[in-house]
Amino acid sequence: MIFSLKSFISSLLLLEASQHYAIAFAPVAQNGGMKTLQRQRQRRYSSTMQLEEPAIGFENSCYISQEDSSPIVTLGKGSEKEKVVNSHGLKGLLATIILNPIWSLAMYITDKVCNAVEGLDENRSFYDTTGKIWAKSWLTMIDSYPTVSGDVERLKENNDLGACLFVANHASWLDIPVLCTVLDPVFKFIAKGELKSVPCIGQQLTGGNHILIDREDRRSQLRTFKEGVAWLNKGVPLMAFPEGMRSSDGRLMEFKGGIFSMAVRAGVPIVPLSISNTHAVMPGYALFPIQKGAGKLHVHVHEPISIEGKSEAELAELVKVTLLSKLPLEQHPLPSEINEEDAKDDVEDVNTKNLVGTN
């Protein structure tokens, strides 16, 4: 119950080094240009928000190199795990010191109450709400609340979509709190098992009955599949990153196998979520966000992809093309990895032939 800042920072370094959070299971800085951009007021999430892309960082990069981020503190200097903290990062540290003990206490109390009353909060929806409140508060305190566009009605509690598999690109640790601000219904992450040792995050994962997997254990992979299908059959959506790890440069990577099989087995649609610019706001070399995310962080909710009549390979390709259709060009794979022109040509077919509306 006693929150240790030293323990938290050490664990966060471990989290960053692992390069994983929610995983699929399977055996140039332009700072000068940024200064000329007009500062825009950050708009909160609402069902009427129709901004189709981030206000900053869609056509032009908002990425800042480590040197240009003006580090104040460097941890693990010279090692592969080197992390920096700049002036904005200190705000993130302050927000963490203030909010994390409250979050931990809220989870502790909620867990005790739920365990004491049989049948109360079986899906741990109320328990998971503590994490969502933390994410919204933390991002607000560091001026990084994301905007959202697309099929936002689908993210509301009590929508008629039912169970589905949410999938998103993964470019930063910041993806996690960003997703928690826009996904209102109860959902379960598929997460790396070793994260249960990280303060607060591990408490949230284990107490919320999220799906934890040991990538080296084949039995764990099978257990993950069964647990995932069971949650989907109960009407609870899952959230996974099909890339299986965070992209080091923010560009969409190849998908790991296996994640789409749960949607196929349970007969539920797949809902892609394109997340913009988290790699720029909190890059891999930073322990905390290095710049404000307001106007840069954005989530686009795509219409669901039907699994009917499609193989896992076909579903993977459809998801990839759909995600790319709303990602900044800086987050597209390099030409040697994918023909971007072909991907753009395929977007219309994805939107008109392969997506289904609300069930």
Image: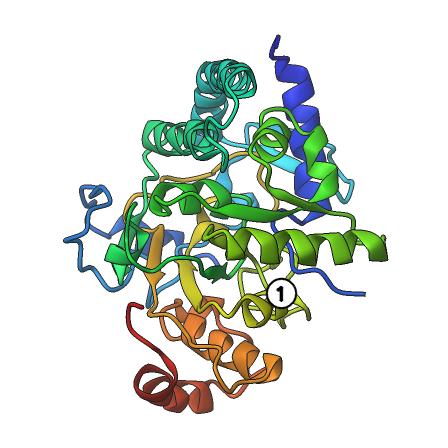
Quadrant of the image containing the N terminus:
top right
Which residue of the protein is positioned furthest toward the top in this rendering? 2
Residue 24 horizontal/vertical position (percent): 65, 60
Residue 132 horizontal/vertical position (percent): 41, 34
Q: Residues within 10 Å of mark 1 (few under 14, many from 20)?
A: many
Q: Residue at x 61, y 26 (%)?
A: 203
Q: Is 63 on the left or on the right of 336, as rendered?
A: left
Residue 134 horizontal/vertical position (percent): 42, 28
- Residue type, mark 1 in image: Ile
For residue 355, say whether it is visible: yes
Quadrant of the image containing the C terminus:
bottom left
Question: Looking at the image, is 246 positioned above or below residue 200?
Answer: below
Question: Looking at the image, is 17 positioned above or below residue 320?
Answer: above
How many marks can you see?
Answer: 1
Residue beneath label 1, please? Answer: 259
Question: Looking at the image, is 358 positioned above or below residue 210?
Answer: below
Q: Residue at x 50, y 31 (%)?
A: 86
